[in-house]
Image (tube, grey):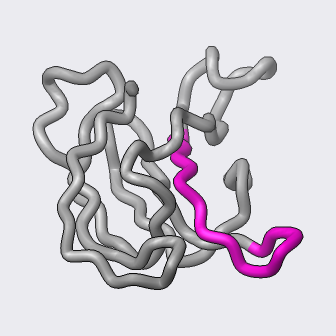
Amino acid sequence: MPDLTLERVGHACCAVRKGVAVLGGAFKGQAGIEITASVEVLENSSASSAAGGINFKALAPLSCSAIYGSTVVPIDEGESEQGQVLLIGGWDEHNVVSSAVHLVDLAT
């Protein structure tokens, strides 16, 4: 299996379409532990790498800002090219617990 594009902990992940989505989390940056809004998807397609096969592809960052420790569930994906998920709860970059539920379209 390939590595993530960004090593992280406390991320949320779920199956979407023909892959796996990985959202948010924390990583060890230059200033210590940093929270990320990054999103990546594990794809199985010949277009996903020069040699073809399985790779993680970075997508647009979360519009709801950086988050870790959240839960994510896939929802009806009929209206999105990449799929849609609900991102639920978690902690933000200020270590504030959230009860928010965000609709995330992985194509935008």
29 above or below 22?
Answer: below
Q: Residue at x 64, y 24 (%)?
A: 48
Q: Which residue is drawn at 25% across and 47% down?
A: 85
19 above or below 88?
Answer: above
Report x, y in % for residue 93: 53, 72
42 above or below 14?
Answer: above
Q: Is 42 positioned to the left or the right of 2 in the image? A: left
Report x, y in % for residue 16: 32, 42
Q: Which residue is drawn at 62% across and 35% down?
A: 57
Report x, y in % for residue 60: 52, 34
Which residue reaches farthest front? 94
Q: Is 52 positioned to the left or the right of 17 in the image? A: right
Picture quadrant where residue 27 is located = bottom right
- Along the line of sight, which residue is nearer the eye, 34 or 82? 34
Where's the C terminus, which quadrant? top left
- Along the line of sight, which residue is nearer the eye, 71 or 18? 71
Say if the magenta span includes residue 67.
no
Q: Is 79 positioned to the left or the right of 43 in the image? A: left
Picture quadrant where residue 30 is located = bottom right
Which residue reaches farthest right? 30
- Along the line of sight, which residue is nearer the eye, 18 or 36? 36
User: How many numbered badges does the structure rendering display?
Assistant: 0
Report x, y in % for residue 1: 68, 53
Q: Is the magenta stretch mostly helix, strand or loop?
A: strand
**In this picture, which residue range is highlighted in magenta?**
28-42
Q: Residue at x 24, y 66 (%)?
A: 88
